[in-house]
Image: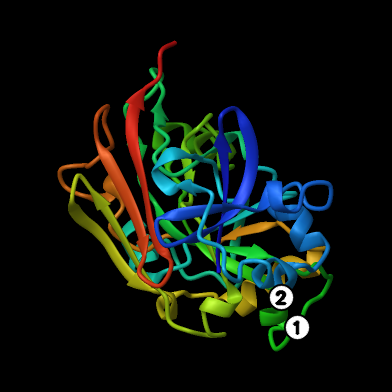
Amino acid sequence: MKLLSFTKDGRESFGAVVGDKVVDLGRKFAGRYADIVSVLKADALGEVEGALAGEAGDYALADVEILPVIPNPPKIICIGVNYDSHRTEIGRDPSARPMVFARFPASQAGHLEPLLLPPESPTFDYEGEIAVIIGKGGRRISEEDCWEHIAGYAPYNDATIRDWQRHTAQWGPGKNWYKTGGFGPWMATRGEIADGQTLHLKTRLNGLEVQNATSDEMIFSIPYLIAYCSTYIPLEPGDVIVTGTPGGVGVRREPKLFMKDGDLVEVEITEVGVLQNPIKAEQA
């Protein structure tokens, strides 16, 4: 099942993708589930999937405005330097533990929504990543049990304003500019992705492939990240763990390759879908 959040005629809802159409689950479950997070909190993915039997779709996918998969996540936990190809290109020594930082929901944008290039910086860089959406909360989750806590997976562009990232040792300012992080177009639920299945990640800028890796290349695996993060804070349904970017980022290329007004950036997880975002210069 592929779930997405969307707006139609000014009304925010959530739905399932059926071919090139969307089933409006917000309307179907009105009064019970308002969004994907409420479905996850109720442990109702099975109920939702069962309700799709025989559904042909309410709207054409092209006729809805797609929002970030989880517009209202309790937490967005991001992992830095989680591929050796990226660690090597930025010249960092190996770390015994994951590098963890946070994003805020206002920094996210949906599929086909412009990522905003701020006038304060020309150093807007792509970072294609695999996002894991938590379905079942918990504290001190073991690596062996982690799969039971995963709701699904989605492409994520942890796009970064590089010069602001380097203002201090803390990365927050570079990672949280308004509408700079793409998340979508949908999440493929755990039923579509086998536990431990290799996921293939690619990033393209104006059609040029700039990143290509698999989940097997992560330094810290998805089970490890869930176990680690749930040790210091309880994970909740709807939390998003963004698992890190591979090598090939623009800041480490010669010449440097930053995103500009009018560009198109794509992040693909072959087993899930393709996230597309145009780049638009933000007016001060």
Q: Which residue lies under the disc numbered 1?
A: 142
Q: Residue at x 44, y 75 (%)?
A: 215
Q: Is residue 207 visible?
A: yes
Locate residue 39 relative to residue 164 in the image: left or right: right
Locate residue 80 relative to residue 252 in the image: left or right: right
Dot 1: within a 10 Å radius of its alpha carbon, few (fewer than 14), some, or many (20 or more) residues?
A: some
Number of the label disc, if any, that sits on residue 222 = none
Q: Are marks 1 and 2 in contact (CB under 8 Å)?
A: yes
Dot 2: within a 10 Å radius of its alpha carbon, few (fewer than 14), some, or many (20 or more) residues?
A: many
| Relative image position of residue 246 (x, y in whole percent) | 37, 63
Q: Which quadrant would residue 256 be assigned to in this image?
A: top left
Q: Which residue lies under the disc numbered 2?
A: 227
Relative to 238, does residue 125 appear above or below in the rendering? above
Q: Residue at x 27, y 27 (%)?
A: 261
| Relative image position of residue 123 (x, y in whole percent) | 33, 33
Q: Nearer the viewer, residue 50 or 54?
A: 54
Amino acid carrying mark 2 in the image: Ala
Q: CA distance from mark 1 to mark 2?
A: 5 Å
Quadrant of the frame with the C terminus: top left
Relative to 46, does residue 233 appear above or below in the rendering? above
